[in-house]
Amino acid sequence: MTFHFAALTLQLAVAFAETGVTPPPFRLTIASEPASISTLEQRSSGGSYLLNQLHAGLLEWRDGHLNPRLGRCQKTNAKQITCRLRPEFQWSDGQPIEAQQFVNTFQSFLDPKKPGLRADLLFPLENAEAILAGTKGKTSLGVKARSQPEQILEFQLRDGGLADEFLLNLSNPLLAPLAEPENHHPDPLKMKTSGPYSVVEWNKSGIYTLAPNSFHGKNPNRPRLQFRIVTEDAVALTLFQKKELDFLRHLPTLYIPEFAKTVAFHKVPQLRFDYFAFGPALEKFPDLRAALSLSLDFRELKQLFSADEMPGCPGIPDAWYTPQTCIEFDLVTAQARFAKAQQQKTLWPPLRLVYSKAGGEDHDRAAQWLQAQWKKNLGVEVSLAQLDNKVFLNLIKTDPPPLFRRGLSPDRPSCQSVLDSFNPQANEPLLAVKDPTFLKILNDFAKATTAAQKQKLCHLAMENLQKHFILIPTGPLYFSILVNPNWQGWQLNELNQLNLADLHFIAP
């Protein structure tokens, strides 16, 4: 049955193309205007769906595996990776993408005077950190280009055991090549792009139109894209219902029962590690942290959000850290720990849970549920504060509140990517964990060379975070989205990277 449907889809697409009729634009939203369309200026962005159509990396993560994109890469030895560029992918002006352009881009990421915001993605390369520190020249970077008989990149790593993680880094669109890496803020209408699209309209009113890059692979039916800025999920849903959008990037959980059985509904698993964190102000109150964690009936939260899996467990694949570790509802223990904690009550800071408005109404509902649980099960009052995202991020960096929600979208599909965000020595850790046992696990993980070793250490790290009640994981997450069923070929992976290179329209 699947074969016949695929064949029919292909026939309809060909028939539509043969009519000579231009397909309609594919309409979708972004949360905010990108500060720049240069990958050098991006860390993460509400405009990532747009940027990912302009930039393509050497590899891509699709269907749970690394796949070739602009290049085919393999480990030559423990400290070396070789990538051969694929000539069927070219710049949007038809010029070949050259290996040296990758080298130039990576060197710009490490410019000590004006580095790229994600220069850390290149730290596994030989001399990368020294170049960024200004103690070595850029030509010493562990990447070389060859042009004969084909375009080849050779990566030299600073240490053995880093190859697998660096290959995952190469699937990050932020490591896409730039034709002019010295230009940190290029004109969107003039920028050469390596991805499946280029910009043809950049409107101050928040409308951005992208046209197909016909030199990127083989998809003659690729349509134009039209992005518009919409900050509220409810507004975007209304636009989708009025048929003014073709792709709704986030369906609030409140509406899942209404749309779950429609052909437009899709549920995409995500590699995320979201959690409620205990800030430094509660570091000296382990009994209070334990009571707040164990007093939550996660079964209610699961039902409230129509979740497939239980909250209280890390939102990463079980295979990364088998056996699974979760915080479980235990009201008896929670109340006993709370009774002990009350002996220090005069020293508590006012309990306040802070979270970002960027999470929309779902984060608001979750915060209200936590507040009600703590009042009902412990009799403790916790105030709520939902802040503008910029204000929120600045607050948790400068003066972290006692309780706050963080969302971590790993930049590569590995447990190490998650653990790096808790390393006090990392560049802007999301939550610095100073427990000596945890830090030893991080150190051992960086030296691990086998999948079995990494799996065991990942389990120990997750267990440590929960045993000491450093955070409350929200559980595995799925993105519920709505897509006009006349559009086929879109790809949304577990890292929330949207690839529209194969997008095509099926005439109704």
Image (cartoon, grey):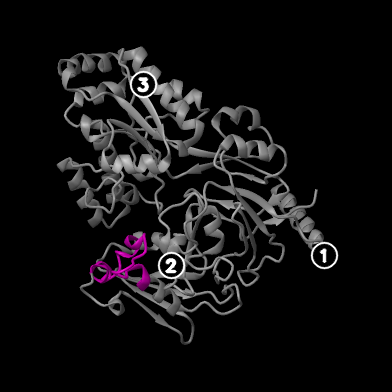
Quick one: 19 or 405, which is closer to the camera? 405
Q: Are marks 2 and 1 in contact (CB under 8 Å)?
A: no
Mark 1, residues whose alpha carbon is within 10 Å: few (<14), some, or many (≥20)?
A: few
Q: Quadrant of residue 11?
A: bottom right
- Above or below, 320 against 163 in this view is above
- Above or below, 356 against 369 in this view is below
Residue 180 highlighted magenta (yes or no): no
Q: Position of residue 269 (x, y in %)?
A: 50, 42
Q: In the displayed image of the protein, which residue is found farthest to the right?
A: 19
Q: Quadrant of residue 312?
A: top left
Q: Badge 1 is on which residue?
A: 20
Mark 2, residues whose alpha carbon is within 10 Å: few (<14), some, or many (≥20)?
A: some
Residues in magenta? 107-133
Q: In the displayed image of the protein, which residue is found farthest to the bottom?
A: 148
Q: Name which residue type carries label 3.
A: Leu
Q: Badge 3 is on which residue?
A: 296
Say which mark, if any, is on residue 184.
Answer: 2
Q: Position of residue 424 (x, y in %)?
A: 22, 48
Q: Name which residue type carries label 1.
A: Gly
Say which mark, if any, is on residue 287.
Answer: none
| Sequence-wise first label, 2 or 1 | 1
Mark 3, residues whose alpha carbon is within 10 Å: few (<14), some, or many (≥20)?
A: many
Q: Does residue 108 appear left or right of residue 86 in this picture?
A: left
Residue 122 highlighted magenta (yes or no): yes
Q: Are marks 3 and 2 in contact (CB under 8 Å)?
A: no
Quick one: 261 or 362, which is closer to the camera? 362
Tell which tag, 3 or 2, sits nearer the viewer.
Answer: 2
Residue 171 shows up from this direction: no
Residue 328 shows up from this direction: yes
Q: Dot 1: what SS? A: loop
Q: Dot 3: what SS? A: loop
